[in-house]
Image (cartoon, helix red, strand yellow):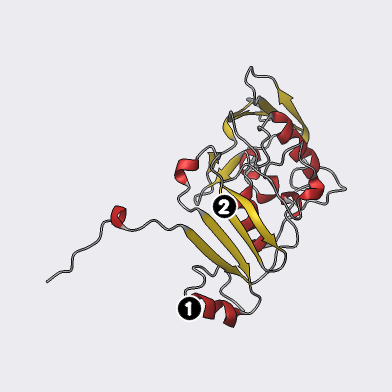
Amino acid sequence: MIPETTEAEDLPPVQSLHIAFSNVPLQFDPAVMSTNAAIQVAFAVYEGLVWVDQDLTTQPALAESWEASDDLLSWTFKLRQDVEFHHGALLTAQDVVYTFGRLLDPAIGSPLRSVLSFIASVDAVDDGTPAGAVRFTLTSANADLPLLCGAPQALILSHEYDSELLPNAPSGTGPFRVDELVPGQHIRFIRNDSYWAAAEILLQEVFHIYTPSFDDRAAALSAGEVNLLPDISG
């Protein structure tokens, strides 16, 4: 006899996800992130103007839409309305200007700076909405600007948020907010109920656990203490 199958909707919802990483993120400033552990934190907490799907196609995120001039020297991104940062401020074009200003600042040392060297200016545009729009003016035509806006280093920061707080209290617009951070040990994220696409977020909490030893991570997986090992090597 063929056993009865259980419909997906009958399964109990997963409330919590525990992920064990081998490397500890050293900082939480998207502009200078490079390790997998740090980038995983960034995409939980922050968002970019766009996100890049598995086919390397750009999809709307903080930008609802974008268009280029015929010569590809000017790009305008229309921002999503009523998007809230974790500390309560609303997203505006000034946040995008601030973020890309940091990326292009030699003092910040972002690995994306040289890649974005074709950007001449980033300006806020009054399009009659509270959030506004952002215009990128380029020194040379570049059809890849939207794709580059999906890089982890280009995740958007609030211009009102003190960057000195980023190491211990990162604040973005993303689906999860940092609830507890124990440096070198773990980070607990909780669902951001104010997220603009909150209905799509099924998890209530996510734990990032930092364990350098592969044997210890594998043992934790076998014991059911963690659900996922992104780093399969030692």
User: Viewed as shown, does residue 194 lie left or right of 172?
Assistant: left
User: Viewed as shown, does residue 1 lie left or right of 148?
Assistant: left
Count of marks placed on residues: 2
Which mark identifies residue 223? Answer: 1
Q: In which quarter of the image is residue 28?
A: bottom right
Depicted 81 relative to depicted 112: above or below: above
Depicted 231 relative to depicted 171: above or below: below
- Extreme right residue here? 107
Helix, strand or loop at mark 1:
loop
Depicted 233 relative to depicted 117: above or below: below
x then y, percent, for residue 120: 79, 33
User: Viewed as shown, does residue 229 lie left or right of 94?
Assistant: left
- Extreme top residue here? 128
Question: Which residue sits at x=64%, y=19%?
Answer: 127
Q: Determine the CA span between mark 1 and mark 2.
A: 24 Å
x then y, percent, for residue 79: 61, 30
Helix, strand or loop at mark 2:
strand
Crowd around label 1: few <14 · some 14–19 · many ≥20 (10 Å): few
Q: Nearer the viewer, residue 79 or 217?
A: 217
Amino acid residing under circle 1: Ala
Check the picture and name the quadrant holding the C terminus. bottom right
Q: Mark 2 points at which residue?
A: 190
Can residue 29 be seen at all in this image of the molecule? yes
x then y, percent, for residue 89: 68, 34
x then y, percent, for residue 171: 69, 46
Identify the mark nearer the N-term, 1 or 2. Answer: 2
Q: In which quarter of the image is residue 143?
A: top right
